């Protein structure tokens, strides 16, 4: 008995359904959570950095305005205000005179320190009615500018 191969009773071929991506394996969930955590940390860090730069830029803009007025007491007040922003109030509020100048120098590199060296000029400008000469004011202004650029980038970390 010979049968023709075309007539053999064969079962239909059933193709399996394509595997679904859902539900994801636990490893993929861990990767998703890790990526979301990194995104949140990046957003928080960027926002914090932006606020820090905003305060720094505002202080530097106010400093530029003070250059034209040549008012050393306003310059000192700006430094004090910025110091109160970036450092603990208990540490900064009580400082005056030599202690204030030492504090300002302590946040600068040794090469850039100069507040203590200019202390007499600062004190005479703050407490006398005599107008400060342009050269001395420029030295004080440059020192304040240097401090504002340096302090805003490092001291927020120290405050926390």
Image (cartoon, rainbow, N blue to C red):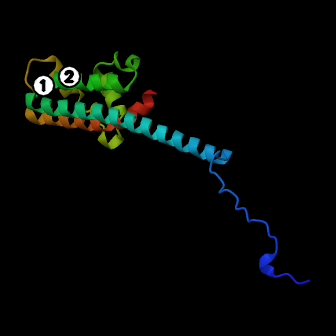
Q: Residue at x 38, y 35 (%)?
A: 47
Q: Position of residue 107 (x, y in %)?
A: 36, 34
Please indicate whether residue 147 sits to the left or right of residue 106 in the image: left
Q: Residue at x 22, y 34 (%)?
A: 60
Please indicate whether residue 87 sits to the left or right of residue 8 in the image: left
Q: Residue at x 37, y 37 (%)?
A: 49
Q: Is residue 124 visible?
A: no
- Depicted 88 relative to depicted 21: above or below: above
Q: Which residue is under mark 1? A: 71
Mark 1, secondary structure of its residue: loop
- Depicted 14 relative to depicted 78: above or below: below
Name which of mark 2 and mark 1 comes first in the sequence: 1
Q: Position of residue 133 (x, y in %)?
A: 8, 31
Direction bottom: furthest residue: 2
Q: Which residue is under mark 2? A: 123
- Indicate the quadrant where residue 53 lies: top left
Q: Position of residue 154 (x, y in %)?
A: 39, 36
């Amino acid at each position: 008995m010979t049968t023709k191969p075309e007539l053999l009773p064969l079962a239909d071929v059933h193709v399996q359904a394509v595997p679904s991506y859902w539900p994801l394996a636990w490893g993929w969930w861990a990767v998703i959570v890790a990526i979301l955590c990194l995104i949140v940390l990046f957003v928080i860090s960027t926002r914090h950095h932006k606020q820090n730069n905003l305060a720094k830029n505002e202080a530097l803009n106010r400093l530029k305005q003070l250059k034209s007025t040549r008012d050393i007491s306003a310059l000192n007040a700006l430094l004090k205000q910025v110091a109160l922003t970036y450092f603990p109030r208990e540490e900064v509020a009580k400082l005056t005179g030599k202690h204030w100048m030492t504090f300002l120098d302590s946040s600068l590199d040794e090469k850039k320190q100069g507040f203590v060296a200019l202390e007499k000029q600062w004190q005479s400008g703050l407490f006398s009615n005599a107008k400060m000469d342009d050269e001395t004011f420029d030295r004080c202004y440059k020192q304040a500018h240097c401090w504002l650029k340096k302090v805003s980038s490092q001291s927020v970390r120290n405050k926390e």
